[in-house]
Image: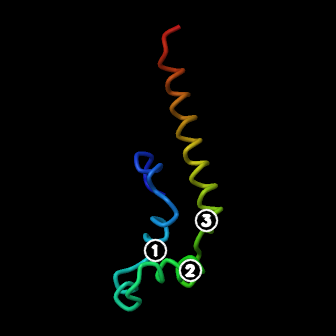
Amino acid sequence: FPDESGLKTFNYEDYLDSKITPTDLFYLKSRELARKLVEHSHKGMILSREEFEERKAAAEAAKTEQSSVFYSRSRPM
């Protein structure tokens, strides 16, 4: 997963692309085919789209929680 600043723009296709090498693209000649091979776990352990979305939502929730805790601690009483 990217850092918090890029979390909202990071999607499942970006995740799959992060697993594709230049060599994969050279031989396959298609990013879409390379994504399909990655998605079907031909390149090791890969999250399903559902697992990816769950983890992304959890990371966003944790970031929101962290922000609200920081905000409540910084407010004067």
- Residue 44: numbered disc: 2
Whether pointer 3 and pointer 2 mark residues with C-beta atoms closer than 8 Å, the reply is no
Sequence order check, earlier mark of 3 and 2: 2
CA–CA distance between discs 1 and 2? 9 Å
As drawn, the label of residue 19 is 1
Query: Is residue 72 shown above or below 65?
Result: above
Does 38 sit above or below residue 6?
Answer: below
Q: CA distance from mark 3 to mark 1?
A: 14 Å
- Please report the residue visible at 63 percent of the width from the left and 68 percent of the height from the top: 48
Looking at the rendered structure, the kind of residue marked 1 is: Lys
Q: Position of residue 35 (x, y in %)?
A: 49, 77
Of pointers 1 and 2, the one earlier in the residue sequence: 1
Front one among 40 and 32: 32
Mark 2: give few (<14), some (14-19) or many (20+) Cα within 10 Å.
few
Disc ID at residue 49: 3
| Secondary structure under the numbered disc 3 in the rendered image | helix
Name the kind of residue labelled 2 in the image. Answer: Gly
Q: Where does residue 77 sit, x and y in percent of width and height?
A: 53, 7
Amino acid identity at mark 3: Arg
Secondary structure state at the residue bearing disc 1: loop
Disc 3 and disc 2: Cα gap in Å?
A: 15 Å
Mark closer to the observer (3, 1): 3
Q: Residue at x 45, y 65 (%)?
A: 14
